[in-house]
Amino acid sequence: MLSVAPMTALRRSLSLRDRGVCRLLCVCVAFFGVGCDEGGLTHIDARRDLGVTDAEVADGGADAGGDQGVGEDGGCAPLPLAYVPADTAGPPAESQAACELRVGASEPSEGPMGQRYVVRTIGSVAAPVTLSCGGTGDGTGLYAARSQVFGCGQRLRVVDLARGACVVVEAATSGPHVCAEERAQAAVLDVSPAVTSALLGVSSVALADDRALLVAPVANSNPLGACDHTTTPSAALAGFIGGPCNGDTDCAYTGGVCQLQSEGYPGGHCTRACTTSCPDQPGPNAFTGCAAPDDTLRCYARCDFTLFATGCRPGYGCFTEAAPAVGGRDRDICLPLLCLP
């Protein structure tokens, strides 16, 4: 069982919405509200609130305060909402080509909360493809699709399901067609053969192969190529937004503030004030997001399933919160859990 938030911290939850009873026969409280399956599509904010460049944000390195002994979450962390591909209402056994002809140009506008994608390869030296963000994909570069969601040029951390291998790639083209996802009954991501070679050991993957990878947006200052972000799980988020801390000095970036374990944040929680967006930092860090689950705008780590099995470090769960600005998209962020038997 987790170290739970002190009851005094729950005073902030009384005016917030009740989100239902948690899975696995326990109640999970993100100490600003109860977080469970609310149904519907999850909005993954990958086009807005992408973070701002902060030249003074330094790589904080390992957190000097340690993790204060926070253990496993005991099964209380909420599961990500299931991704439901668009239903194009086509006839049974319709081919993908026929579906695309009937539907016309149409691409997914969202991504899965759990960040799991069935992948297929596009482009090769023999059959290069035109990338909608510019240039040509010949299979040798580290590119991926879904630029209509992530934005052209957005860096993505891609890992195998065991989180044993990691590469940083770039969103360089749009797609897939909604008919591909309907056919696969899963979120689909088109990637370069160089990506599957590095992570799956094969250079050609079709949807029928049902091979999956985990994909999360990361700071654009991350270099393309192999990464060691998953090599030392305890180093994830250390010294940066969402990471553990014992005091403000452990949050080694501009404006860093430590919300203490005694205040209801397991292992402490690095944050900073924000208005609409938050800085991002290279390395084993999550994308960040500005949100006000307790009515005060602060920076939080976004849920990142490439780093953590539950999307968040132990003691925290993945919950959807509103964007701080009108017209912005909801963001999935990591908040403290209170697990009740």
Image: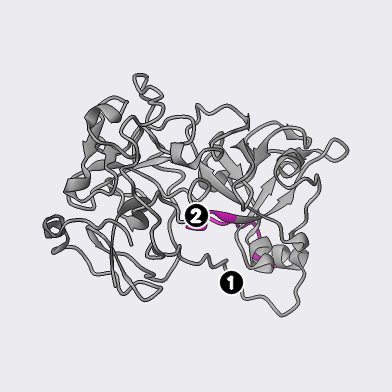
Could you say where residue 262 lies in the image, as x and y percent from the top left? Answer: 17, 47
Task: Judge from the rendering whether residue 134 lies leftward or rightward of residue 85; answer left or right.
Answer: right
Quadrant hosting residue 40: bottom left
Residue nearest the observer in this picture, 20 or 77: 77
Secondary structure mainly formed by the magenta segment: loop
Could you say where residue 293 lies in the image, as x and y percent from the top left? Answer: 23, 53
Magenta segment: does it hold 156?
no
Residue 273 visible within the image? no
Mark 2 residue type: Ala
Q: Which residues are magenta?
A: 102-116
The disc placed on residue 309 is: 2
Residue 126 visible within the image? yes
- Identify the residue at image location x=68%, y=49%: 190
Q: Residues within 10 Å of mark 1 (few under 14, many from 20)?
A: few
Of the 4 image quadrants, the one containing the C terminus is bottom left
Label 2, secondary structure: give it.
Answer: loop
- Identify the residue at image location x=82%, y=39%: 124
Q: Which residue is mark 1?
A: 87
Of the 4 image quadrants, the one containing the N terminus is bottom left
Q: Where is 136 relative to 254, above or below? A: below
Residue nearest the observer in this picture, 92 or 18: 18
Residue nearest the observer in this picture, 243 or 143: 243
Magenta segment: does it hold 103?
yes
Q: Where is 295 relative to 103, above or below? A: above
